[in-house]
Image (spheres, coloured by chain):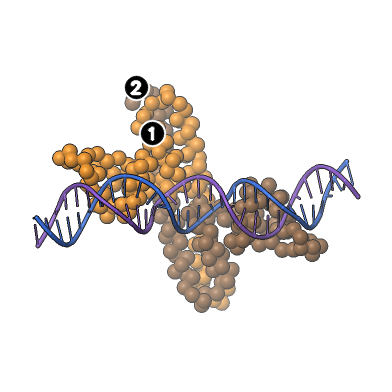
Chain colours: A brown, B orange, C purple, D blue
Amino acid sequence: MRIGELARRSGLSRDTLRFYERQGLIRSGPGPDNTNSYRDYPEDALITLEQVADAQAAGISIAELVMLLGQLEAADPDSFDGEAFLQDRIDEVEARIVRAERFLDSLKQAKAALAAPPVLR
Amino acid sequence: MRIGELARRSGLSRDTLRFYERQGLIRSGPGPDNTNSYRDYPEDALITLEQVADAQAAGISIAELVMLLGQLEAADPDSFDGEAFLQDRIDEVEARIVRAERFLDSLKQAKAALAAPPVLR
DNA sequence: CAAAACCATGGAGTTAAGTCAACGGTTTTG
DNA sequence: CAAAACCGTTGACTTAACTCCATGGTTTTG
């Protein structure tokens, strides 16, 4: 599909998609009839973009994500210590989730307090 | 306590603390003997800073956090619709946690795959 | 086939959250 | 009391992640 469709379907801007492609997060090939004038994205770019959004929500930067993607698809365990790198990200993300959940609780408590009958305040 | 101690105990830089104070996230009073030369932070600034870190992990910006803090301590429910605002933040944070957890699962699966005996790959 | 709609590239600009440097005043300490 | 250790302010700078703009080429459509 072309960039406009991907933008519409992903909710991202065309500029963002081109930016992501420059960063190496998504890839596009030459068009269907091999005219190379417009980018052509595969259907699964949408899935990749969802994963990118997940990673960002988890506090992973684009640079880190590019490294992770490289790790995962290289699947070359002898290259360097990708396992330790992965474990570090796992620890980071877990810590972040703990913090986010703690904050979520505060928000909920605050809301409950606001919603309570004024006499209780 | 003075800024150096707060920095050491919170793990943040003095510059960051002054920046947070300018933004309205923490407050300092005049020193103990009322000499006003150095900032003096109350003990509970440390707690506030933990909450700030939690909020940031939850994807809340400083500007939003300042509004939230205002909401919470005003506790003036008739002012404007703070309840709706709170609910919006709650929804956002929950969505973010869902994404982060999904990403965490991917990371764990990737690690398991790497750790598996090569014959399985 | 011409207008409308779409796309590419390059480069500059923006925002959030800090970070750094320079310069000078204040407190503490041996 | 002088040196060392701290602190304050101002303003410029940095980084990440976009976003915008200008200019010009390509596809689609009526």
A88 relative position to A76: left or right: left
Q: Residue at x 18, y 40 (%)?
A: B35
Which numbered circle lies on residue B70? 1
Q: Residue at x 40, y 55 (%)?
A: A95
- Residue density around tag 1, few if under 14, some if 14–19, many if 20 or more, within 10 Å: some
Q: Residue at x 57, y 71 (%)?
A: A74
* Separation (CA) of disc 2 from disc 1: 21 Å
Residue mark closest to the camera, 2 vs 1: 1
Residue A115 in sight from this viewpoint: yes
Is A103 or D27 nearer to us in this picture? D27
Mark 1: which secondary structure? helix
x, y percent for residue D13? 44, 56
- Residue density around tag 2, few if under 14, some if 14–19, many if 20 or more, within 10 Å: few
Answer above or below: position of B92 versus C29: above
Q: Chain of mark 1?
A: B
x, y percent for residue B81? 47, 28
Q: Report the number of discs.
A: 2
